[in-house]
Image (cartoon, rainbow, N blue to C red):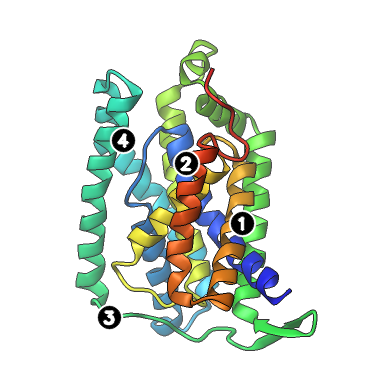
Amino acid sequence: MDILVLGILLGGSYALMALGLQLQYGVARIMNLANGEVLVAGSFGAFWFWTGLKLSPFLSIVPAALLAFVANWLVYRYVLRPLVRRAKSHGQLEVDSILATFGMSFILVGVMIAVFGGEYFSYSYLARPFEIFGQPYGLNRIVAFAGSAVLCIVLALWLTRSRTGLALRGVAVNPTAAGLVGIDVLKASALAFALGGAVTATGGALLSTFLTFDASLGVIFTMKALIIIIFGGVSDIRGAIVASFILGIVESAVARLIDPGLTLAAAYILFIAVLLWRPQGLFGRKSA
């Protein structure tokens, strides 16, 4: 039971991280290798709110999300859109976007090291026990999970019930057909990319309340987000959420039963298994 609860708490926080990348890759067709650095930037924002301004790190979510939204929109508009326009195939766009965002990840790491330094950071916020089924768990983890759950539900409802959300889903399924029915695919892609950055930064602020982080940790978060969206299915929000919980439970089980140092290895083994036996993901469909 202890492993299950810890896995669910961790998976809820992973869900936001994965949904951000899923919006960018599933809708905008951009494999953003700087996604993890945006998450770490959100963590630094929460850290600064608590240690510098003496304000709750959760108050950093709104400005962090807004800044990430604007920054990601500008990146798509002026850096990535030219790549989209010149790409003659989806494969070429993937290669170009991977190279471009890989370079951006180094820029973001350099900026964060220049501003905050290269040491590890952590802070104590709501770090007191709260009992679930008779076992104590960190209140910061529980609050982070609750915040993540609310945001995931709101995002899922917006994507399935609003006109704009349905347009984004249409672009994710078939951008050519979406364009034929009057959807501005480039504007929808820019919105998805910007929204994905905002969601990721929000996840970083929540995770920072109980994780130790540094400026170079983003690559691990990027890979975990990639594992989750491929495991769940690139264009399906349900799959990303379910896969987040599965990864959280797997990591908790490995950390508790074997060795905490093997959690990342377990994530990669899960990733390889998915690629070998179900490359379309839990909720994905096989290509015709």
- The residue to which callout 2 is attached is 275
Mark 1: amino acid: Ile
Circles 4 and 2: CB distance less than 8 Å?
no
Which kind of residue does numbered mark 2 sit on? Leu
Tell me: residue 89, above or below residue 228: above
Whether 191 is drawn above or below 285: the answer is below
Q: Which residue is tagged 3?
A: 119
State the CA–CA distance, disc 4 to disc 3: 33 Å
Nearest to viewer (mark 4 / mark 3): 3
Disc nearer the start of the sequence (4/3): 4
Kindly tell me whether residue 20 is visible in this rendering. Answer: no
Residues at marks 1 and 2, CA–CA distance in whole angstroms: 16 Å
Looking at the rendered structure, the kind of residue marked 3 is Glu
Q: Which mark is residue 246?
A: 1
The residue drawn where x is 58% and y is 70% is 252
Q: Dividing the image into 4 quarters, which one contains the N terminus?
A: bottom right
- Residue 240 or residue 86, whichever sits in front: 240
Q: Secondary structure at mark 1?
A: helix
N-terminal-most mark, 1 or 4:
4
| Residue labelled with disc 4 | 77
Q: Earlier in the sequence, mark 3 or mark 2?
A: 3
Mark 3 neighbour density, 10 Å: few (under 14) some (14–19) many (20 or more): few
